[in-house]
Amino acid sequence: MTTLTSAPPVSRQRVRAALALTLLPALLIAAVVLAVGTGAVQISPAQVVSIFLAPLGVAPLAPYEEQQAAVLYAIRLPRVVLGALVGAGLAVAGTAMQGLFRNPLADPGLLGISSGASLAAAMSVVLGFRLFGSSSLPVAAFAGSLASTTLVYALSQERGRVSVPTMLLAGIAVNALCGAGTGLMTFLATDEQLRTITFWNLGSLGGATWPTVLSALPLIAVGVLALPLLARALNALMLGESGAAHLGIPVQRVKWTVVVLVALSVGAGVAVAGTIGFVGLVVPHLLRLLIGPNHRALLPASALLGAALLVLADLFARTVAVPAEVPIGIVTALLGAPFFLYLLRQGRREGL
C-alpha cells in the first residue's frame, strides 16, 4: 500500500500545527465576513459585524439599513453556512479516507459515494420522484450515496473482515456501474430533465435555505465532530493494520466507523450541494505537507480549511461572471485537477 508523503521534523510539525489551528479560524471568519458582504447589495465588513452583534445589544460599528440585514440573514448567510458545512465535511472525510487507506490519492469518491448519489438523483429526475416535494432530489441523492457505500462494503468483506484493497477495487467497479446508470438516465432524459441533471452534477450552493442547512447539519456535524475522535486510531493505522492491532486498536471496528461517518458526512453534503470534487483530496494533502501527518491536528485543521476554501470558491463562482453563476464544481475542479496531477507526478518520482 502506498505511504503518505514525507513531512517536516516532529518539533517543527507541532509549531506549524499550533500556528495553523490558531490562524485557520481567523481565515474562516474572514472568508465568511467577505462572502456575506459581497453581492448585488454591498455590505461592508464593519456593517456585517454590526449586523451580527445587533442581537447582543452591542452598538453598531457602522450604520446599516434593514434591507442589508434582511439580505444577509435570509439569502447570503444560509448559503455561506451551507458552503462551510459541506467544505468541512468533504475535507474531514478526505483526511480520514487518506489515513485509512494510507494513500494521499484517496478521497470519498473512491467508495462510490458521489457516483451513487448522482445515479439516484438522475433517476429521481427522469422517473419523476416527488414523494418529498422539493426535497425529493436531495433525499434520493442521500439514499443513493448510502446504498452505494453499503454495496462497496458488502463486496469488500472477506471472512468477516474488511479488505482495504478489495474495497478500493469494489469502489472502482461501483463507480463505473453508477456512471453507466447515470449515462443511461441522461440518454432517456428530456431537455428540461437533462438541464436539471447536468446542473446538479456540476455542484451548486444556489438552492441554500435555512431548511436546507438544517437538513444537512446533523449528518455532516456527526462526521466532522466524530472523526477527530478517531485520530489516535488513524495514527496507529499508519503503521499498518498489524502494528495498529498490536497497539490495542480495534482495527475492524475503526474501519467500519470511519466508512460510516464518511458516508454520512459526504452523502449529506452531496445531497444538498451536488457533486463537488477535489476538496477532500486537496485540503488534507496540502495540510499534511505543512503540519505533518498527525491526525490530532490534521482533522480539525482540515475542517477549518475545507470550510474556508468552499466559502471562497462559492464567492468566486457567484461573482466572476455576474449576472450568471459558474457551478462551484467547475471552480473546485480547476483548483483540484492540477493539484491531483502534481500528486501523481510526485508519486512517480518517489516510486510509489
Image (cartoon, rainbow, N blue to C red):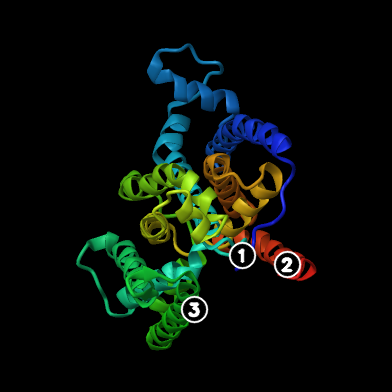
Q: Would you say the residues marked 2 and 3 are in contact, meaning their CB atoms lie under 8 Å apart? A: no
Q: Which residue is mark 2?
A: 347
Q: Would you say the residues marked 1 and 3 are in contact, meaning their CB atoms lie under 8 Å apart? A: no
Q: Which residue is mark 1?
A: 105
Residue at disc 3, secondary structure: helix
Q: Residues within 10 Å of mark 1 (few under 14, many from 20)?
A: many
User: In terms of sequence position, does the residue under pointer 2 or pointer 3 come before the other?
Assistant: 3
Q: In the rendered image, is residue 16 in sight?
A: yes
Which amino acid type corresponds to the residue marked 2 in the rendered image? Gly
Q: From what the image shows, is residue 150 above or below residue 170?
A: above
Residue at disc 2, secondary structure: helix
Q: From what the image shows, is residue 124 above or below residue 277?
A: below
> Residue 277 or 317: which is nearer the viewer?
277
Q: CA distance from mark 2 to mark 3?
A: 20 Å
Q: Would you say the residues marked 1 and 2 are in contact, meaning their CB atoms lie under 8 Å apart? A: yes
Q: Residue 262's x, y, as percent?
A: 42, 57
Please state, as top left, top right, bottom left or bottom right, where the N terminus lies in the image: bottom right
Q: Is residue 36 left or right of residue 190?
A: right
Q: Which residue is mark 3?
A: 169
Q: Residue 328's x, y, as percent?
A: 55, 58
Q: In the rendered image, is residue 205 in sight?
A: no
In percent of the image, x 43 and y 42: which residue is there?
229
Which amino acid type corresponds to the residue marked 3 in the rendered image? Leu
Q: Residues within 10 Å of mark 3 (few under 14, many from 20)?
A: some
User: In terms of sequence position, does the residue under pointer 1 or pointer 3 come before the other?
Assistant: 1
